Image (cartoon, grey):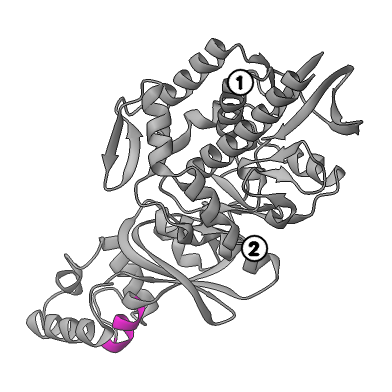
Amino acid sequence: MKADIIVIGGGASGMMAAVCAARQGAGVLILERMPRIGKKLLATGNGRCNYTNEHMDPACYHSRNHAQIAGVLEDFGAEDAIGFFRDLGILPKSNDGYVYPNSMQAASILDCLRFELERLGVKVLENKNVRQVLTKGRGFQVKCGDETFHCRRLILACGGRASAKLGSDGSGYTLAKSLGHSIVPVVPALTGLKAGESIYKSLSGVRAEARVSLYIDGKLKDSHRGEVQLAEYGISGIPVFQLSGQAAYGLRNRRDVQCFLDFFPDMSEAALLELLEKRKKQFQGRDAGVFETGLLNRKLIQACMKLAGCRKPGTLPDMTCLAGILKAFPASITESRGYEYAQVCAGGVDLSETDMKTCMSVLHPGLYIIGELLDADGICGGYNLQWAWSTGCLAGNHAGKECHDSNRTN
């Protein structure tokens, strides 16, 4: 089977690329490994699909070639994405900059893309597991089992390794590498972190507002604030997700990785100590439970008191020690929760090997690499989907125009 353009992967970036290429007049074929395109998209934003963010900033992304990020977002940014989906029928709903479909259903985003693919005549073949790509003349051969597909332009939109059950099995890295591309080491990102302290076993299910600070070899790398979820294995929640990729790289490089949770981020340690001393005096002579009540979740404050040196029930620890623990509750990170629980991956195809104005490979003209397969990952809040829309649009427009112009001259 032949097509002007083959897109390997029917996720967010692949569907965007296919739509944009087909609008240029190219014949487009999507090869999808799963039984249905867009399965991972349905899980985004807890099923509500936070598809972009009004506060789009390159600082919200990580990459070894970070300078390349800004141009991509300028060429197709949040306003462009909102307009694109509005034209497909999606009314945007903003919540503190986080943009959702007004239906608050991820299925709305997937459906409007599917309807547009159908309208444009894009052919979608599902259950197609691509294992080999070969260059042939000015085009490419794509092999799926006993089947061979031919195209003039090829777009790799295979995703990373996160959440393999939703379609990303890491095969895209193998395909890119077979074509000569360098892969920046890949680690899980936007996931929970496992901690070595046994005290977390008693804190499962506790949630608390905190600032989480990441230290690698004793040096502060980053910090984020928000609701932290404590689990038997360690720590989770959006502030932890934001740090998890950097933590995973630290672990990969065998560094000492530590997180500290500040449960009173609006107070200095000195001010917190003063509050605790006054509280101790206020409830002097009464049961320790009175002192604990209302400070934090009861299981959490009791854990903090235990770490501060409180050995017997009904007694109080040294207030200086307690203030220190409340401002720097320890989590010695032993590993991340892995790809199974990660929302995205950090690392991927080196951006220096692609022309980020078009996402075309500098090694193979006609080959495009987009989405999570590239070495760029964003924080929570619609940034990773925006990267999918941006790179998909740039690649699809360029590949489609190249094919259309070539058809006209031929």
Q: Where is residue 173 in the image (x, y as percent from the top left)?
A: 76, 44
User: What residue is pinned by disc 2?
Assistant: 64
As drawn, is 183 to the left or to the right of 393? right
- 356 or 343: which is nearer to us? 356
Is 319 in the magenta? yes
Is 378 in the magenta? no
Query: Which amino acid does the dot numbered 1 rest on?
Result: Ala
Classify the position of the C terminus by image quarter: top right
Q: Where is residue 258 in the image (x, y as percent from the top left)?
A: 53, 73
Q: How crowded is mark 1: few (under 14 residues within 10 Å), some or many (20 or more)?
A: many
Res 32 visible: no
Quadrant of residue 145 within the rendered picture: top right
Kindly report the distance in space between the C-alpha atoms of the residues bearing marks 1 and 2.
32 Å
Q: How crowded is mark 2: few (under 14 residues within 10 Å), some or many (20 or more)?
A: some
Q: Position of residue 318 (x, y in %)?
A: 28, 87
User: Image point 74% across, 53% down: which residue?
Assistant: 353
As drawn, is 289 to the left or to the right of 344? left
- 321 or 76: which is nearer to us? 76
As drawn, is 152 to the left or to the right of 198? right
User: Image point 36% across, 20% down: which residue?
Assistant: 89
User: What residue is pinned by disc 1?
Assistant: 22
User: Image point 41% across, 34% down: which residue?
Assistant: 49
Relative to residue 75, is residue 228 depicted above or below? Answer: below
- Judged by its main secondary structure, the magenta piece is helix
Query: Which amino acid does the dot numbered 2 rest on?
Result: Arg
As helix, strand or loop, the secondary structure at mark 2 comes to loop
Res 288 visible: yes
Write down the region rendered in magenta.
318-325
As helix, strand or loop, the secondary structure at mark 1 comes to helix
Classify the position of the N terminus by image quarter: top right
